[in-house]
């Protein structure tokens, strides 16, 4: 049996973060870009979901349902991911509490996995359509 020794540096837990490492101009420019990207992303994904939900014929297609699922996952990434990036760029640390941090991380990871797996399902569905049905 091997013995392991773990050294803990106490300075890590007591370190402070310098809030002035990024200039205010860069923060404002990046924030405006993220607002633009977020507005277009949230609006576009909501329009995709609304168009699939409101049209009965579009709801009957598996491809459209997968696209709606992808739009929902991307919407979650926009809503939960962009504010986290802005907080990270401010370089002040997470200020919304431990529970909010864990919920935010869980939703982001679940949405990313959902987005990736939806793209895989969409690719398989398209392959089956072209390879098997179109023969």
Image: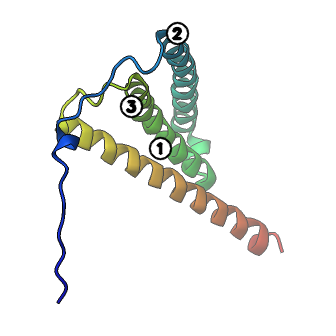
Q: Which residue is mark 2?
A: 25
On the picture, is 95 further left or further right than 89? left
Secondary structure found at label 2: helix
Vertical arrangement, residue 120 with respect to residue 47, above or below: below
Point out the residue furthest to the right here.
Answer: 135
Which of 61 and 41 lies nearest the eye of the viewer? 41
User: Where is residue 119 shown, x and y percent of the image?
Assistant: 59, 55
Marks 3 and 1, how far apart at CA: 16 Å
Marks 2 and 3, how far apart at CA: 19 Å
Which of 99 and 30 lies nearest the eye of the viewer? 30
Residue positioned 70% across, 62% down in the render: 126
On the picture, is 64 further left or further right than 112? right
| Front position among marks 3 and 1 | 3
Residue positioned 54% across, 46% down in the render: 70
- Picture disc at residue 73: 1
First in sequence: mark 2 or mark 3?
2
Marks 1 and 2, how far apart at CA: 32 Å
| Front position among marks 2 and 3 | 2
Q: Residues within 10 Å of mark 3 (few under 14, many from 20)?
A: some
């Amino acid at each position: 049996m091997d013995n392991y020794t773990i050294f803990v540096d106490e300075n890590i837990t007591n370190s402070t973060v310098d809030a002035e490492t990024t200039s205010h101009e860069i923060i404002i420019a990046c924030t405006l870009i993220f607002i633009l990207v977020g507005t277009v992303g949230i609006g576009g994904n909501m329009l995709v979901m609304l168009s699939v939900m409101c049209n009965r014929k579009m709801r009957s297609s598996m491809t459209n349902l997968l696209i709606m699922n992808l739009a929902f996952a991307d919407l979650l990434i926009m809503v939960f991911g962009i504010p986290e990036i802005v907080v990270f760029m401010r370089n002040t640390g997470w200020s919304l509490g431990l529970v909010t941090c864990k919920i935010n991380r869980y939703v982001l990871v679940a949405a990313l996995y959902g987005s990736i797996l939806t793209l895989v399902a969409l690719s398989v569905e398209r392959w089956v359509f072209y390879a098997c049905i179109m023969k």
